[in-house]
Amino acid sequence: MKLTSRNKAAFGLGAFGKDIVYMLVSTYILNYYNVELGMDSVFIGTVLMAARVFDAINDPVMGIVVAKTRSRWGRFRPWIFTGTVFNAIVTYALFAVPEMGDGAARAWLTIFYLIWGVTYTLMDIPFWSMIPAITSPGPDREQLSSLARACSGIGDAVPAVLTTIVVPVLSGGAVAGHWRIGYRWWAMMIAVFFVLAELVFVLNVPERRVEEMKAPGIRDMFSSLLRNDQALTVVSAIIMVYMELNIVGNLMLYFCQYDIGDSSTYSLFTAVGFSGQVILMAFVPALLTRTDKLKMFRYGIVFQILGYVLLLLCALTNVHKTVSWMILLLPSLIIYAGYGVLNVLLTIFLSDSVDYGEVRNGSREESVIFSMQTFTVKLASGIAVFLAGVVIRLISLDTEAASQTAATLTGLRMWMTIPSILLLIAAYIVFRVFYRLDDKRMEEISRTIHGCRM
């Protein structure tokens, strides 16, 4: 189906709105409960990991529910808006913990974070499932994927950049550790915008008629997933790529606060990084006219690895203290620019795997395949926060102290870079060995699908 400029703009706004909420939770939930509420970092990480175990069941089931949905508003949009409203409420609750004891606060986190994952799934799976459902392989899909991911990147940047600026203001100028009221108001503002953005989306992005798509059963779903080796390859890479950026995202906030000595520097670090990410995302369709997707994927991997190596070298040599901390903006730009390329390409790869699955298995399963993306993105975030929580305890970081030991700072610098490098190397190996849907193969698949639908 042919999308208008208005349709694409609404799609971009929807991606922007939902990622503001996601980034607020994935980046700041550890800091909020650990620094502001004084909760144990390992407990926080454990809760987030446990929620991901539940998602292993919940997300694929939600994919089936979406695929079987029939309504006058379509298959995807009812769930997108319903999930948005509930998730907005729960997001506010996560950052509006009443004054209570540690045990009650732990229960609050456990209950509301579990509900947050479920409600985010309600809207995220059908949202991304619409890309392969309303586009065909080639330029149209690449352009919409690039637009959506670029807008997602901007949405990611808003809380990443502004939280450590806005929250202190909303807290009356208080220092870190006294930002509870600021987090509460900031979460409310983001939640309201989230609902408005997705309302615009559902009112302006059309769907293909549901009769054109077949809904799989539970047995069919697991059978098809096991047979769709390309989807499983992409999902594996998504876990590793999202995890590596979440690791540095969670630990960098502590690095800025305790190593640089100013938590507000995190805003500029992420602002420069996300600027590079969004710019590269926007240019991916143009770059794909000059090179193939698999080669560009390798470039993105190498770019990020170089960024992490540079960040580690700068930190270990104390250049950020002897010269200026702003020298760290260069590796930030490189890391996030490389991630931007990978983020767009992985969405395209996953959409292509849907078409591959239709030819190989005889059924289209947008919702099922993209439920795996939703699950793996949240899984990567959960693992990263768990790892960050363990690292904070392992290196003996004291959140109540103004300064840290040399050993603590060295451990922080190494843990926020080396694991990410190893994950990127693993992602490259997985794609090099198992992924086969190059441009030529996708042209063949597109012709086959088009011929079957004639």
Image (tube, rainbow, N blue to C red):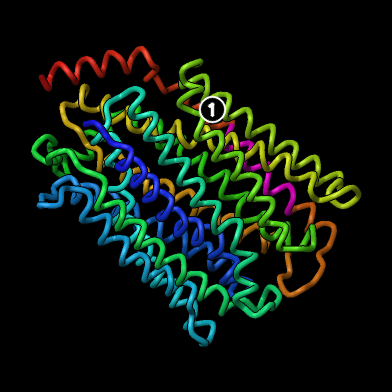
Provide the secondary structure element on which disc 1 rests.
Answer: helix
Image vertical order of residue 44 relative to residue 377, above or below: below
**x and y percentages locating residue 35 in the rendered image:** 64, 72
| Location of residue 245 (image quadrant) | top right
Task: Let me know if residue 427 appears in the view.
Answer: yes
Image quadrant where one finds the N terminus: top left
Q: Give the range drawn in magenta.
A: 412-424
Magenta span includes 415: yes
| Location of residue 254 (image quadrant) | bottom right
Image vertical order of residue 348 relative to residue 170, above or below: above
Q: Is the magenta stretch mostly helix, strand or loop?
A: helix
Residue at the far bottom in the pictured view: 100
**x and y percentages locating residue 84 in the rendered image:** 32, 61
- Name the residue: 50% across, 34% down: 282
Return the residue at label 1. Answer: 428
Task: Let me know if residue 38 appears in the view.
Answer: no
Magenta span includes 223: no
Left or right, 161 with respect to 427, comes to right
| Location of residue 444 (image quadrant) | top left
- Name the residue: 61% across, 56% down: 161
Amino acid type shown at disc 1: Tyr
**x and y percentages locating residue 63 in the rendered image:** 24, 47
Left or right, 401 with respect to 249, comes to right
